[in-house]
Amino acid sequence: MTRTVSILIPAYNAERWIEETIRSALAQTWPRKEIIVVDDGSTDQTLEVARRFASKNVVVATQENQGAAAARNKAFSLCQGNYIQWLDADDLLSPGKVSRQMEAFERGCSDRTLLSCGWGYFMYRPRRTHFRPTALWCDLSPTEWLIRKMGQNLFMSVATWLASRELTQAAGPWNTRLLVDDDGEYVCRVLLASDGVRFVPEAKVYYRLSGSGTLSDLGRSSRKLDAQFHSIRLHIDRLLSLENSERTRAACVRLLQDWSINFYPERMDIVKEANQVAAELGGRLHTPQLSWKYDWIRRLFGWGAAKRALLVLPQLKWRLFRWWDRTLFRLERAR
């Protein structure tokens, strides 16, 4: 019996991308699929564009703006599928993504196995996507996956996952209180409820770059910084619940060290707490180090100026890159 896959798309002010994203969902070669789009109170034409695709297999719902996590939870409450595919409103799936992963289920994966795949960055031109394998691109136990992710500060797009309804329900809903890194925290819970990760190399996800990096995304928002540190603490607690050993504690300390630059020196209260956590884990945090591009600013003008440059310059760089890629995209379309 062919099983149904639900492709769940939260959307907020995504009128530029939502059509392409829905088309990539419709293009999936897996025969039984439903697509649920939840507009999270957009102020642009996102809802109107999505409603053009409304049909028996494409459900479009809307809600007051509550955040992506709440929109994902609503989408899941509306879906009927046996398997769940999360998809952000600006990302794309390769046509065979779902089919390749469902074939893995049919070859003997249990409904507690979490399926993953390769993914790459792009801006406007998917064919120019850069696929760069990391240490997460293989079959792994939940513990090993988290050790690699946290110890090497790696990222995996949420669209790479395919999970059964059973596993999704066991993990629980998305955390609507986290302003940032709700996807990282959610995946931790899915991993804890799983029996391991199966990597399917033939499947592909195209992750659209829309920001300039984690530090710029966090900015100077105290609430976002609090939420990010809360997510880090949750990561640590969940890894240690799987295995409390020298190697897992070392991965936790490394995660704290990698993220310390985001809090230093503006939020010394968080830095102090991070140092306390590291000490409890048997480690020690060092003062964050800036790359040579910014360290000379620190030496001449202090940490405040260096952090401002660290926030602003990547934004300017990405704006230039996006402008150039958009220009080439338009030229290609014109031809």
Image (cartoon, grey):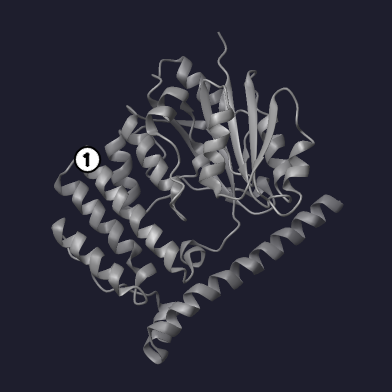
Extreme-right residue of the structure: 334
Please indicate, yes or no, whether residue 134 appears anywhere in the rendered image: no
Q: Position of residue 206 (x, y in %)?
A: 59, 43
Which residue does the numbered mark 1 point to in the structure image?
241
**In this orientation, which residue lies closer to the viewer: 185 or 159?**
185
**Position above or below: 223 against 34:** below
Q: Position of residue 268 (x, y in %)?
A: 30, 74
Where's residue 30, x and y in %?
62, 21
Extreme residue toward the bottom, this view: 300
Q: Amino acid at mark 1?
A: Ser
Residue 98's x, y, as percent?
Answer: 57, 27
Query: Which image quadrant is residue 277 in?
Result: bottom left
Query: In the orientation shown, which residue stands out farthest toward the top?
Result: 1
User: 217 and 31: which one is in front?
Assistant: 217
Residue situated in front as seen by the camera: 202 or 185: 185
**Vertical arrangement, residue 8 with respect to residue 266, above or below:** above
At numbered mark 1, what does the secondary structure look like: helix, strand or loop?
Answer: helix
Res 243 seen here: yes
What residue is at 47 percent from the left and 68 percent from the top? 221
Mark 1 surroundings: few (<14), some (14-19) or many (≥20) residues within 10 A: few
Please report the residue visible at 30 percent of the width from the left and 57 percent of the height from the top. 255
